[in-house]
Amino acid sequence: MELTQATVNDLLARLGPEVSHMYLPDDLDPQDLFDLLAGRYGTPRTLVLAGFTDPTVDESKGAALLAPFEDRAVTIRAWAYGDQWVGTGTARDADGAERPVLVVAHREVPGLFAVTPDEDADGGADADQDVNWMERLIRITGWTQPARRPDVDWAEMESRLGTALPSDYKRMVETFGHGAFDGFLDLNQEPWTDLREDGLLIWAGTEHENLYCWRADGDDPDLWPVVIRSFDGEDVAFDCQAAEFVCRILTDPDHPFTMARFFDTHWFMNYRESD
């Protein structure tokens, strides 16, 4: 069986929006299918390895993908992609033979103001000061991987830049590593200083040549507003931090810099297996 991205599209089209799976031909190399899906969706989460299920797997981490196999899954790796979980690997069929599988399941995508587990369900989840925007961003993108860059030497970087950096940005880099939101908004691993004479530090950018910056005013970087320097040199300011800004452009179709009108799924594409 020859595998291409077009073949994968055809296979996924045969599977319904809810929990659905198929056993694939025995001559298909599971690694080939894994490589194609990883090239499309980025780094996966391992749910089952050598027949042992990760005990931390729950509904928020793709547990629905395991339902069709009961205790017969051998290796299953999963990707969160918008409102869908996609998984592949191998499982034993009714005759006990280990075969390649492809499986999908519905995924609940949290809205911008869905209460996160660390927020007060009775109180101010709609009040910006009560929102943990990084936790919300992790949920919106379906990120289930361990932190990609937990050991960044921020003290060295901040000393070299001559300024402290916003805490939510540092957590974004530590959590997601080198890559892009929706494969479009590139997260800089260190702020660019090209616009420093204008009082701006650049924390992200897009292929449309918009630069996502902070107005680096004041001693508290957590109070720096986001400023977008457009491709034509116009500056547009937003009174929020970077993580909140990303959450809003991912989910609000009416935001002036929305990505929600162009992408109906939200994920983070990590460019490297390890950073």
Image (tube, helix red, strand yellow):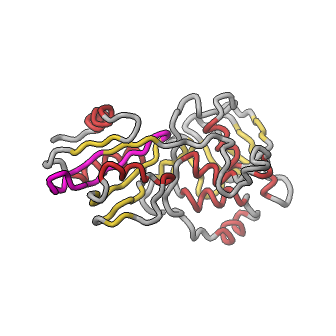
Q: Is residue 88 left or right of residue 154?
A: left
Counting from the top left corner in percent of width and height, residue 73 is at 29, 57
The question of residue 86 being in magenta is answered with yes
Q: Residue at x 60, y 37 (%)?
A: 209
Q: Is residue 123 left or right of residue 40?
A: right
- Name the quadrant containing residue 232: top right
Question: How many labels, in total?
Answer: 0
Counting from the top left corner in percent of width and height, residue 41 is at 42, 46
Counting from the top left corner in percent of width and height, residue 123 is at 79, 49
Which contiguous range is marked in magenta? Answer: 82-102
Evaluate whether residue 177 shows in this view.
Answer: yes
Instruction: Identify whether 267 is placed above or below 178.
Output: above
Q: Main secondary structure of the magenta part?
A: strand
Q: Residue at x 69, y 53 (%)?
A: 193
Instruction: Identify whether 234 is placed above or below 73.
Output: above
Q: Is residue 112 left or right of residue 91?
A: right
Counting from the top left corner in percent of width and height, residue 69 is at 29, 52
Evaluate whether residue 200 shows in this view.
Answer: no
Q: Residue at x 25, y 54 (%)?
A: 31
Q: Nearer the viewer, residue 14 or 45?
A: 14
